[in-house]
Amino acid sequence: MFTHGLIDSHCHFSNDDSKNLVDFMQSSFIGSFSGFIDAATNLRQIEWNLRNQHFLKKFTAGIHPLDCSKSKDLLDKIVESAELGLLIGIGEIGLDRRFLD
């Protein structure tokens, strides 16, 4: 998958539809990064990742616990992406200290 160097394991490229994304990734690859993992947290971000595949970028997808009751379409898209072999991770996203109370 990724061959050498550092991996940015939690980026949000899908939040920025920048046309310079490929240039950025390739210039970083020449430096020390060997890959990027975009963290998709909604349907739009998953669809963006499906449209913008690149050998330096993989993606993960998850559903925030507060969104579970309204996430049928998102879950369907996660399953579809996984069945195509396009995801490298699936899981819950968003648990943090503020929910410990």
Image (cartoon, rainbow, N blue to C red):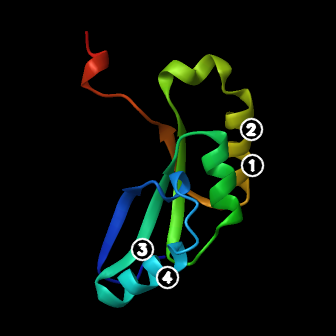
Q: Is 91 situated left or right of 52 in this image?
A: left
Q: Nearer the viewer, mark 4 or mark 2?
A: 4
Rendered residue at 46%/84% (across/down): 26
Pointer 3 or 1: first along the chain: 3
Pointer 3 or 4: first along the chain: 4
Mark drawn on residue 80: 1
Query: Could you give the CA–CA distance between mark 3 and mark 1, rounded to whole angstroms?
Result: 23 Å
Identified by mark 4, the residue type is Asp
Query: Could you give the CA–CA distance between mark 3 and mark 4, rounded to whole angstroms?
Result: 13 Å
Identified by mark 3, the residue type is Gly
Q: Is 47 situated left or right of 20 in this image?
A: right
Rendered residue at 52%/72% (across/down): 21
Q: In terms of depth relative to the viewer, which is nearer, 70 or 2?
A: 70
Query: Could you give the CA–CA distance between mark 1 and mark 2, rounded to whole angstroms?
Result: 6 Å
Q: Residue furthest bottom?
A: 30
Q: Which residue is mark 2?
A: 76
Q: Quadrant of residue 25?
A: bottom left
Identified by mark 1, the residue type is Glu
Q: Residues within 10 Å of mark 3 (few under 14, many from 20)?
A: many
Q: In terms of depth relative to the viewer, which is nearer, 2 or 64?
A: 64
Q: Which residue is mark 3?
A: 35
Q: Nearer the viewer, mark 3 or mark 1?
A: 3
Pointer 2 or 3: first along the chain: 3
Rendered residue at 49%/82% (across/down): 23
Picture coordinates of residue 4, whole percent (x, y): 33, 83
Picture coordinates of residue 60, whole percent (x, y): 52, 52
